[in-house]
Amino acid sequence: RLRSAPVTVRFVTNTTKESKRDLLERLTGLGFDIAEHEIFTSLTAARNLLEQQQVRPLLLVDDKALPDFTGIGTDDPNAVVVGLAPEHFHYEMMNRAFR
């Protein structure tokens, strides 16, 4: 019914554990009729903000989330993006983030 209604359909999630592409594959595998542009994640919001502010982040996100930041410069970071990534929360990485 939503597809035939005069409304825009979006799938919104706050997950930071997987890329939009992985999420799309999982949802289509469950039978959802969905396109990638219809998915909006917290990583999408983070990327939009990085682009607007023109900053170079240190990405403390799960490795599976990294594709959502393709093309974003991360050399000499001046910002930090934090997601659910327990494997990256260790002394060395936290020290880099605080610097």
Image (cartoon, rainbow, N blue to C red):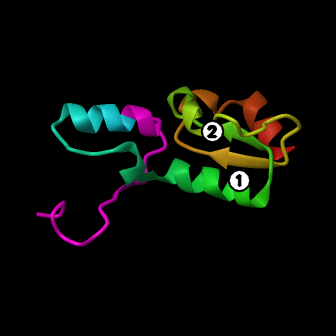
Q: Please state, as top left, top right, bottom left or bottom right, where the C terminus lies in the image.
A: top right
Badge 1: few (under 14), some or many (20 or more) residues near its Cα, within 10 Å? Answer: some
- Residues 36 and 48: in front is 36
- Residues 60 and 23: in front is 23
Relative placement, left or right, of 26 versus 16 is left
Please, is residue 92 above or below residue 24 in the view? above
Badge 2: few (under 14), some or many (20 or more) residues near its Cα, within 10 Å? Answer: some
Tell me which residue sits at (74%, 32%) in the image.
93
Where's residue 7, x and y in %?
27, 71
As drawn, the label of residue 69 is: 2
Q: Please state, as top left, top right, bottom left or bottom right, where the N terminus lies in the image.
A: bottom left
The three-letter code of the residue at mark 2 reads Phe
**Residue 3 magenta:** yes
Where's residue 43, x and y in %?
54, 48
Tell me which residue sits at (84%, 41%) in the image.
77
Q: Name the residue under label 1.
A: 50
Relative placement, left or right, of 98 versus 13 is right
Tell me which residue sits at (77%, 60%) in the image.
53
Taking the view exactly as shown, the residue that stands out farthest to the bottom is 6
The three-letter code of the residue at mark 1 reads Leu
- Measured Cα–Cα span from mark 2 to mark 1: 10 Å
Per the rendered image, the range of residues in magenta is 1-22
Where's residue 34, x and y in %?
27, 45
- Mark 1 and mark 2 in contact (Cβ < 8 Å)? yes
**Residue 35 magenta:** no
